[in-house]
Image (tube, rainbow, N blue to C red):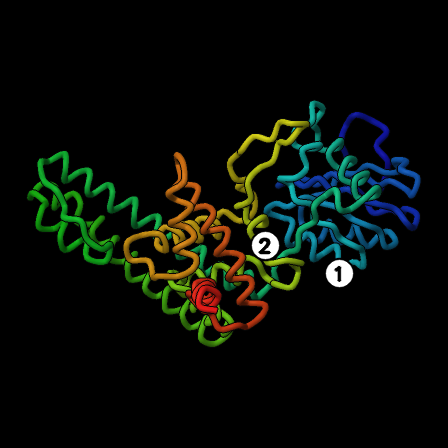
Amino acid sequence: MKKHNSKKEQTAKPGVYPEGCTVGLDVSDEFTYAAVINKDGALLIEDRIKTREPELRRWLMAGPPAVVALETGTHSRWMAKVVRECNHQVIVANARELRLIYAGTNKTDRVDALKLARLARVDPELLKPIQHRGDQEHADLAVIVARELLVKMRTEAINMVRGMVKSDGGRVTACASVSFTRWAAEQLTEALRNALAPILEQIDNLSERIREYDERIEHLAQTTYRQSLLLTQVGGVGTLTAMTFLLTIGDPWRFERSRDVGCYIGLRPKRDQSGERDPKLGITKTGDSRLRRTLVNCAHYILGRFGPDTDLRRWGLKLAGQGTNGKKRAIVAVARKLAVLLHRLLTTGEVYEPLRNAGRQVIAAAS
């Protein structure tokens, strides 16, 4: 390592820094900027490192153990692993919570790295540190992510075909995605059939690949993640939702309370209270958007016409009838309560009772 003495940026070279230092790493796709401060907060070293594993490992191995802070991002997972393997303490900061950095008026890579180091030195909790999921969980979650992408591709292709048929005076009957090509073929004119035949073929191929992913997810649930059976007890929660929940939150014991899960996935209302002013705001929408979207879809089903009769459904329907936009608020509230319920079932292993509260009310009224 060497201290910058000129405005021209140089690639970092390994060096030595004292014990007890704190390192801030501001990561970009090509280069990572490092700032090293001592126990008193004085800046000792600034460096630029290539965002590649060999260069980062060589840089970290050059000095004694330190506290290393970096933000969440594309590279944070493997970089945090390298930092730990080099015998340093790593803090992965939640980038969404670092307004001091992302909303600064003097934002540069060097300044951001220094801010990370200073925050980590003063109080690591200011960085709202996160915990990456394990390697196997990360690989298994990739199956769900890949399936989601294929579903999006199929949806876009189906919508395109529907639009072309409508513009030609026809209309494809509403049907399941796996049956779409059969119904669409009957509505296509000869000219459109020649043009769209490859698209229909790809839709069928996508449906087949999605079915294969569904089988893989079901196999994982039945073999590796048997605890998912605890979650599918809840009406409206299928294997895909249960697996998404399990693989996204990782270790359930890292949450002190079940209700913290709702905050973790961004279903908690924002707060902007000051004095007597405390307006009602929307949800934070922080955390994993995939899990949040999945739980909201489950909430739609629970409150829909085919939803099973449960305490959660009764509570949500009651909330939906209150005031304007009651249905929208109820959907979010049910999704948040569902996250709490799933975490509770996961940590306690209890048998789910759909009408547990209703049963207690009946017993209380009879006594």
Judged from the image, the secondary structure of the residue bearing numbered disc 2 is: loop
Q: Residue 32: horizontal and vertical position, in percent?
A: 70, 41
Residue type marked 2: Arg
Residue type marked 1: Glu
When asked about the image quadrant of residue 270, the answer is top right
- The residue positioned 60% from the left and 35% from the top of the image is 271
- The residue positioned 77% from the left and 27% from the top of the image is 8
Q: Is residue 102 at all visible to an observer of this figure?
A: yes
Judged from the image, the secondary structure of the residue bearing numbered disc 1 is: helix
Residue 284's place in the image compared with 259, above or below, is above
Please give the residue where the numbered disc 1 appears in the rendered image.
85
Are the two marked residues, 1 and 2, in contact with CB atoms closer than 8 angstroms? no
Which residue lies most toward the front here? 367
Q: Residue 286: horizontal and vertical position, in percent?
A: 56, 43
Please give the residue where the numbered disc 2 appears in the rendered image.
259
Residue 39's place in the image compared with 146, above or below, is above
